[in-house]
Image (spheres, rainbow, N blue to C red):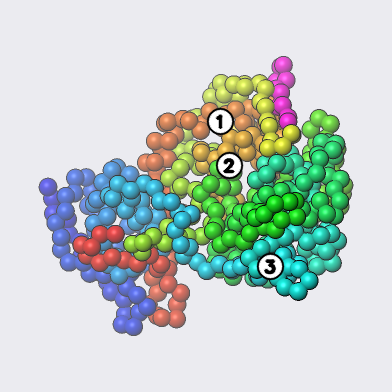
Amino acid sequence: MKLLLFTILIGLEAGAAAQAVETAGTIAVSAEDEMLECPTSAVKDKIEEWRSKAISIYTKGQYQKVATAIDKCFTSKVPLCLNELADEVDLSRNNRSYYDKDHLPRAEQMIVKSEKDLPKEFLDGGFFSTNEGYVKMPKDILTLAKEKGWEALLYKTRSTGGFDDPPNLLMVVIPGRDKDIYIQTSPHGAPQDQNNPVPQLTKDELANGQSTMTIITVDKTVNPPIGQLRLLNKEGYGKDAPYKWTNRLTTESCLKCHSTPLRSISPIGYKVVNGAEKRMSAEDEATTTRINEMMVIKDLSWGRVKTEDGKVLKLGPDQKLRPLGWLPAGSEDRSEDELKLCATTNKKINFAAFGSYRYDAIMSANPTINFSKVKHSMDCAMCHNGSIRGSLNQNFSDQEIRFKILVDRSMPPGADLTDDERIALYNCLNIERTNSKIDKAWKENGEWLKREACADVPTRRTNRMNLERPGTGSGTGR
């Protein structure tokens, strides 16, 4: 047993907006391996240095030591960049691993609070009044969208999409200065020629979707921008029944297929074709590209929720899960010898979408594979880091990974890979998913606790604080 001295050496000038590092006095704690003293300064380098040491101690299982240090060193406010660490420590010491986050109140305001925040054409009204609380898809929506400057596309999907029975999907995008609104339904109607990208539907069939309308709103007035996803269900009978508005947002059930609230669409015939697929028209392909480019939003977040005890929890994928394509520095797991072992694990890979779309990726009898290209295509985590693109992890849908690599071939972006190399890439990524040695390296590395960059703690009220998580004070717990 050793005595560990926690003494803070600096204070912030009078009138500061908040104190981030405070004098904690002297306490006695068990220190089996390493000393963890309070930061000697509130500048970012010192906070980051302290965080790295605290993470090292935490990943060795000494979470109580880190918990005590956080309570004692940051009694007024915990710097924003320590939030992840503080939350993980809290889960460890309270033996709590699960929140039903979708039933907790949101920490942020909704930029779309009711159906009245949609364009009036989407309100369900009669001759004299509006049927409050209900939404409909306007008739002749494709013509209306052109008049309004919205993006609209009727298409057949070769992937997932909607929550009814594709392939028919209708996407309407309403861009704005403060918010973007994405509305999608699955229109009724027979699929006709499955390989034709455009369903042959009447204006009435376009307006009368199946049971679910998906609405995703992006609040661009906050930084980082926040996406919120709603599933509106039909209430009543008949194809023309309206959709009931709800402010119940959905996140947790979407995370296996959505790396962010928005995900690109992939119509039949878009950019590449498989089998008897027909290529999209140049006009529809240009519309699809514009919609997909709008969906790539830097740092797009699912937002946060509040617990009854005042904690603020970040929504989205579990930060502890290992990112798909991550390897520790110096790893030999992608040597050519290793890649040769995994590349041909499966020579025929089947894909089946929600609708009737099917595709089999088949490796050549005598494949020629450039293993250097395969190796450099496995670094998914370089772009899918939660900032450039949404985070992918080892629990992300295998179906969607298979689709992106083998079917629409949009990932990795710009990669010049043969079909054989794509199958090898998928096989090797799949083998890495369950590699316990890599799992252990990820856990010990603690990178998921360093995603937020630290900033200097300001000393004037006029400066923006890098402090968002309330402190708890000495001895109160969290």
Q: Amino acid at mark 2?
A: Cys
In 3D space, how far apart are the residues under numbered discs 1 and 2 (Cα atoms)? 12 Å
Instruction: Pick the quarter of the image with the C terminus.
Output: bottom left
Q: Amino acid at mark 1?
A: Asn
- Residue 344 in the image, given as x and y percentages of width and height: 62, 21
* Residue labelled with disc 1: 430
- Residue 239 in the image, given as x and y percentages of width and height: 75, 51
Which numbered marker is on residue 131? 3
Above or below, 433 against 66 in this view is above
Q: Secondary structure at mark 2?
A: helix
Q: Secondary structure at mark 3?
A: strand
* Residue labelled with disc 2: 380
- Residue 15 in the image, given as x and y percentages of width and height: 34, 83
Identified at 55% across, 40% down, the residue is 396
Closer to the chain start, of discs 1 and 2, is 2
Identified at 30% across, 46% down, the residue is 95
- Residue 232 in the image, given as x and y percentages of width and height: 63, 55
The residue range painted magenta reads 358-372
